[in-house]
């Protein structure tokens, strides 16, 4: 399986020689960290999380290739 950002970059590079317009590639990324204590959880049917500590991390990367006024490709993954 081809990864989305590789496909996006490949489309941009493939279209470069055939385009009379400038090709632009933009990459966006975000990262975050959540940490804290769960004081009161109201949904405790499966597991009681009350009083537990929680920590998590996340990252998202997305990109966009524009090679004409009306041609644009976007892709992203989290």
Image (cartoon, rainbow, N blue to C red):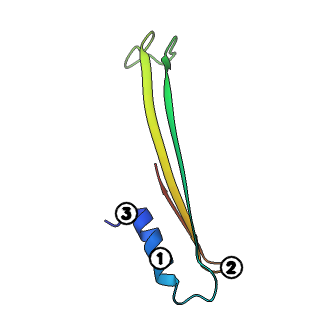
Q: Is residue 20 left or right of residue 53?
A: right
Earlier residue among tags 1 and 3: 3
Assess disc 2: are there few (<14), some (14-19) or many (≥20) residues with their C-alpha within 10 Å of its C-alpha: few
Residue 55 in percent (x, y) is at 43, 25
Decide: marks 3, 2 in contact (CB < 8 A)? no
Residue on which the image places disc 1: 11
Earlier residue among tags 3 and 2: 3
Q: Is residue 7 left or right of residue 23?
A: left
Decide: marks 1, 2 in contact (CB < 8 A)? no
Q: Quadrant of residue 50?
A: top left
Q: Tag 1, which secondary structure?
A: helix
Residue on which the image places disc 3: 3
Residue at image coords 50%, 76%: 12
Q: Tag 2, which secondary structure?
A: loop
Assess disc 1: are there few (<14), some (14-19) or many (≥20) residues with their C-alpha within 10 Å of its C-alpha: some
Residue 24 in percent (x, y) is at 59, 72
Using the numbered discs, state the Cα–Cα distance from disc 3 to disc 2 in whole angstroms: 26 Å
Residue on which the image places disc 2: 69
Nearer to me, 33 or 75: 33
């Amino acid at each position: 399986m081809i990864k989305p950002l590789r496909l996006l970059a490949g489309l941009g590079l493939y279209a470069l020689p055939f385009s009379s317009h400038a090709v632009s590639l933009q990459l966006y990324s975000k990262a975050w960290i959540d940490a804290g204590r769960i004081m009161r959880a109201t949904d405790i049917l499966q597991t009681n999380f009350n009083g537990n500590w929680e920590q998590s991390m996340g990252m998202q990367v997305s990109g966009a290739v524009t090679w004409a006024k009306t041609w644009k490709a976007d892709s992203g993954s989290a």
